[in-house]
Amino acid sequence: MSVAKATEITASSNISFEDAINKGIERAGKTLKNIKGAWVKDQQIVVESGSVIEYKTTLKISFVLKD
């Protein structure tokens, strides 16, 4: 039997939402083991002088707990 847990993180990028997601998963993987999936809970952009300067995403990451 496996037991999974979900945790929420926020990651940002000045390139794209996809880059923010990849950075978030990569960083979470340094602390959380057995990551099995994630879903995007929310996305935001930061606008300055009419241009997007930052992409932010909130992720829910699921991982299996060790026995």
Image (cartoon, helix red, strand yellow):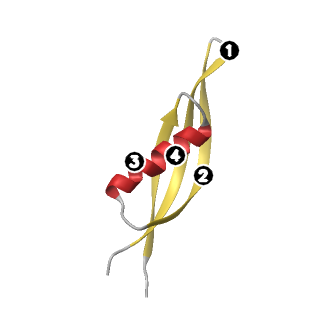
Please identify the quarter of the rendering in which residue 38 is found. Answer: bottom right
- The residue at which mark 3 appears reads as 27
Residue at mark 3 to residue at mark 4: CA–CA distance: 9 Å
Q: Residue at x 53, y 51 (%)?
A: 59
Q: Residue at x 54, y 45 (%)?
A: 21
Query: Considering only vertical position in the picture, is 64 above or below 7?
Result: below
Residue most toward the top? 49
Which quarter of the rendered picture does the N terminus lie within? bottom left
- The residue at which mark 4 appears reads as 22
Which amino acid does the dot numbered 3 rest on? Arg
- The residue at which mark 1 appears reads as 50
Of residues 58 and 24, the one drawn nearer to the viewer in this rendering: 24
Labelled pair 2, 4 in contact (Cβ < 8 Å)? no
Q: Is residue 65 left or right of residue 24?
A: left
Answer with mark 3 or mark 2, whichever residue precedes in sequence: 3
Number of numbered markers:
4
Answer with mark 1 or mark 4, whichever residue precedes in sequence: 4
Is the residue marked by circle 3 packed among few (<14), some (14-19), or many (20+) residues within 10 Å? Answer: few
Q: Nearer the viewer, mark 3 or mark 2?
A: 3
Q: Is residue 33 left or right of residue 49?
A: left
In the rendered image, residue 61, in percent from the top left (x then y), is placed at 49, 59
Q: Residue at x 47, y 43 (%)?
A: 23
Answer with mark 1 or mark 3, whichever residue precedes in sequence: 3
Residue at mark 3 to residue at mark 2: CA–CA distance: 16 Å
Query: Considering only vertical position in the picture, is 35 above or below 4?
Result: above
Labelled pair 2, 1 in contact (Cβ < 8 Å)? no
